[in-house]
Amino acid sequence: MHSLIHAKAMRAGQTPAEQSLWYQLRAHRFMGLKFKRQKPIGPYIVDFVCLERGMIIEVDGGQHGDHVAYDQRRDQWLASQGLTVLRFWNHDVLNRMDMVLERIRQAVEKPSSPAQPPSPPAPLP
């Protein structure tokens, strides 16, 4: 119950980058896929998930540079559940949306295989 309340609060307080990406993903706009936002999965709340494809999309700000070990443990746990994690920096979502959507499209179209290791976001500019 606690995680559902927390997830609801996170949905209400999305960052501009999360809002921008959510506009592209919501309502089956992206490749006809259903995405959910701020969804509890196990002990974590993920930014976006397409359960049909087992894909999680995380949008990271600069604070994630201080939480590398936590993010690695989290991503490993999610991968152990058969989920693929894609990570993007806020800057890329806000300024290079075409590139972000193309990477997501490529991951969606990749043939099914065992859980992929998470993709680290490119270094900050």
Image: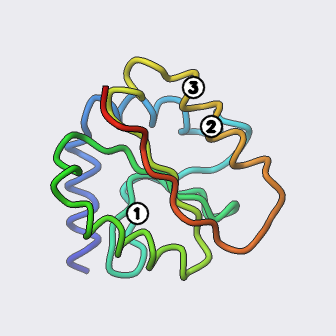
Q: CA distance from mark 3 to mark 2?
A: 6 Å
Looking at marks 3 and 1 on the same chain, the residue that comes earlier in the sequence is marked by: 1
The residue indicated by pointer 3 is 99
**Image quadrant where residue 26 sits:** top right
Looking at marks 1 and 2 on the same chain, the residue that comes earlier in the sequence is marked by: 1
What element does badge 2 sit on? Answer: helix
Residue, x 36% and y 68% (percent of image)? 72
What element does badge 1 sit on? Answer: strand
Query: What amino acid is found at the position of numbered circle 3 in the picture?
Result: Met
Q: Does residue 51 sit above or below 23 in this rendering? A: below
**Image quadrant where residue 81 sits:** bottom right
Mark seen at residue 74: none
The residue indicated by pointer 2 is 103
Q: CA distance from mark 3 to mark 1?
A: 24 Å
Q: Is residue 97 left or right of residue 13?
A: right
Mark 3: give few (<14), some (14-19) or many (20+) Cα within 10 Å.
few
**Picture coordinates of residue 41, whole percent (x, y):** 42, 74
Tags 3 and 2 touching, CB below 8 Å: yes
**Picture coordinates of residue 29, whole percent (x, y):** 64, 33
Tags 1 and 2 touching, CB below 8 Å: no
Query: What amino acid is found at the position of numbered circle 1 in the picture?
Result: Lys
Q: Which one is in front, 91 or 69?
A: 69
**Picture coordinates of residue 94, whole percent (x, y):** 37, 22
The residue indicated by pointer 1 is 39
Query: What amino acid is found at the position of numbered circle 2 in the picture?
Result: Arg
Numbered disc in front, either 1 or 2 = 2
Residue, x 59% and y 31% (percent of image)? 101
The N terminus sits in image quarter: bottom left
**Image quadrant where residue 80 sits:** bottom right
